[in-house]
Image (cartoon, rainbow, N blue to C red):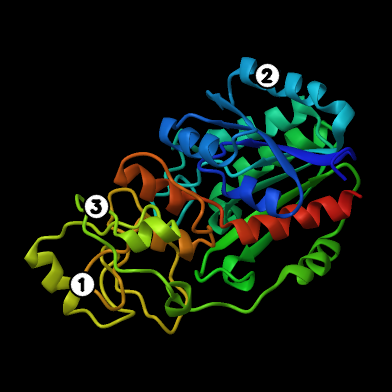
Amino acid sequence: RSKAKRPKAVDLCCGLGGLSLGARNGGIIPIAGVDLCESALNTYQSNFPMAKVISGDIADASIVDKLIAIKVKHAETTSRFLVISGPPCQGFSVAGRRRDRDPRNKVLIHVAIAIATIQPDGALVENVAAIMSEKHSETVRKFSQILTDAGYHVCPIELNSRDFGVPQRRRRVIFFITRRPTNAEAFRNELQKFRRPSLAVGQAFEGLPRAPVRGEKYSDVQKKRGFYNHFAMRHSEKVRKKIADLKPGTGPLSYRRLDPRKEAPTLISGHRAPPAHFKEPRSITVREAARLQGIPDDFRVCGKFGAQMQQVTDAVPPPLGQAAISTLLEIIG
């Protein structure tokens, strides 16, 4: 099998590599990741050492030229060449300000242009469910028209990560981009193969050791078992008391306390604090956030604490990515 042709993919706006990890878990080889965030690219390189890391803006024609060169280089050893992408969604998300003129909204259009230029066998683009609202219809229309003019068919399908074994309610739209027209029913039927029972937060956190406070050293248990990125924030007594007074499943958007019997709500980061642990009076660790995203413990996240949490909360849950990318590959044959 090592000498056989394998499907390969390049990841645009790759972040830490959630989609690439999903692709790899589905037997697809990630060969390049493009992003502007230095810490995210460091994480990507650390976990996908054989892939080419490209720092730059996907709107830059020279970046697209590099991806075309990579496609040509791998042509003889590739059975199917895919483009996968999870462009920034903050401008579309109901959790953000949803600014129509947010410059990040234009990235979706540049991703479409890149796909049309690179001409892969198929492509997949992920974004928040709110992108399908009337408010953003013109952006989606432009995105689809660019791909249609390039000879592709675009089929958007809304999915929820909780239906694929991820302990988090996270509604997303997947744009399946194929050469031949395929109806949504065909994609949904194939996706059924990957559906898994939902997990609760308590189940997701099982087996994790006590999290040392930032500044402390890893315990011997953590070193032995490889629980990286598992540090607790150093809260003031006021904040700890505030969290302790909250019942599981309650609280404001910042410091909302998780309920161990249910899936987590959609993880967000940025200026808001991550959710609070259901048992301890503290915010969750980066490793706990990773578990809520379906990211395995051996996936190490690089950068400072804030950058680590941002990378994890922005990522596409790998189990969702694997289901979607494997479905795309099956459909295009």
- Sequence order check, earlier mark of 2 and 1: 2
The image position of residue 240, as x and y in percent, is 14, 69
Q: Which residue is mark 1?
A: 281
Q: Which residue is mark 3?
A: 217
Q: Disc number at residue 66?
A: 2
Q: Label 1 sits on what residue type? A: Pro
In the figure, is residue 303 to the left or right of 147? Answer: left
Q: Nearer the viewer, mark 2 or mark 1?
A: 1
In the figure, is residue 148 to the left or right of 275? Answer: right
**What SS does tag 1 mark?**
loop
**What SS does tag 2 mark?**
helix
Q: Residues within 10 Å of mark 3 (few under 14, many from 20)?
A: few
Q: Label 2 sits on what residue type? A: Lys
- Sequence order check, earlier mark of 3 and 2: 2
Q: Nearer the viewer, mark 1 or mark 3?
A: 3
- The answer to which quarter of the image holds residue 283 is bottom left
User: For the point 65% across and 55% down, which residue is it?
Assistant: 321
- Sequence order check, earlier mark of 1 and 3: 3
Residue 156 seen in this snapshot: no
User: For the point 42% across and 79% down, which residue is it?
Assistant: 202
Q: CA distance from mark 3 to mark 2?
A: 42 Å
Where 238 falls versus 28 (above or below)?
A: below
- The answer to which quarter of the image holds residue 255 is bottom left
Q: Disc number at residue 228?
A: none
